[in-house]
Image: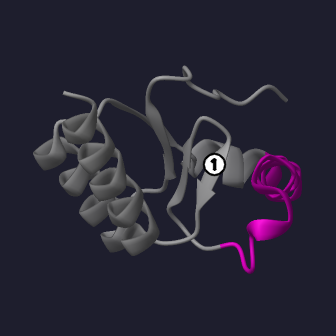
Amino acid sequence: MNYPIGRNDEFVIYSKSGCKNCSIAKSYLLKAGKPFLEVNCDDYILENKNDFLNFIFKKAGETLEKPQFPFIFFNNTFFQSKSQMEDFCNKELIDEFLEC
């Protein structure tokens, strides 16, 4: 099965319904003004959970410790947690400021 992967200039959040951490991550990106694609994975999990998890493991590489939603990517960088994503966004904002 082919899963959405998003563009290089946006975050991709693989989420599922009712996931509190997914909602928190999406809210953070909205407030930070970062573009993102949300991929709701409910159907993927129902249709073929193992195939979907294999896709996530391959996309994340060896950085994925355990499968837990949300799965967040930006330009092939995988974020295991919202705090890792926040650190990245803050560093990116600092880098943009220094370039001005």
Q: In which image quadrant can residue 82 be found?
A: bottom left
Badge 1 element: strand
Please give the residue where the numbered disc 1 appears in the rendered image.
77
* Residue 50 is one of the magenta-drawn residues: yes
Taking 8 as reference, is 63 left or right? right
Q: Quadrant of residue 22?
A: bottom left
Instruction: Give the magenta part as a residue range.
Output: 48-67
User: Does residue 48 appear left or right of residue 93 in this picture?
Assistant: right
Image coordinates of residue 64 in percent, x first then y, are 74, 70
Q: Residue at x 17, y 46 (%)?
A: 32
Along the line of sight, the residue nearer the viewer: 41 or 37 = 37
Image position of 87 with respect to 3: above or below: below
- Residue 30 appears left or right of 35: left
- Identify whether 38 is placed above or below 32: above
Residue 56, x across and y down, in percent: 76, 52
Residue found 17% across the figure and 36% down from its top? 33
68 with respect to 55 (left or right): left
Q: Give the residue type that dot 1 points to.
A: Thr
| Image colouring | one colour
Residue located at (75% from left, 79% from top):
65
Residue 56 in view (yes/no): yes
Frontmost residue, 58 versus 45: 58
Asked whether residue 95 is drawn in magenta, I would say: no
Residue 14: x percent and y percent?
54, 48
Residue drawn at (79%, 25%) of the image: 2
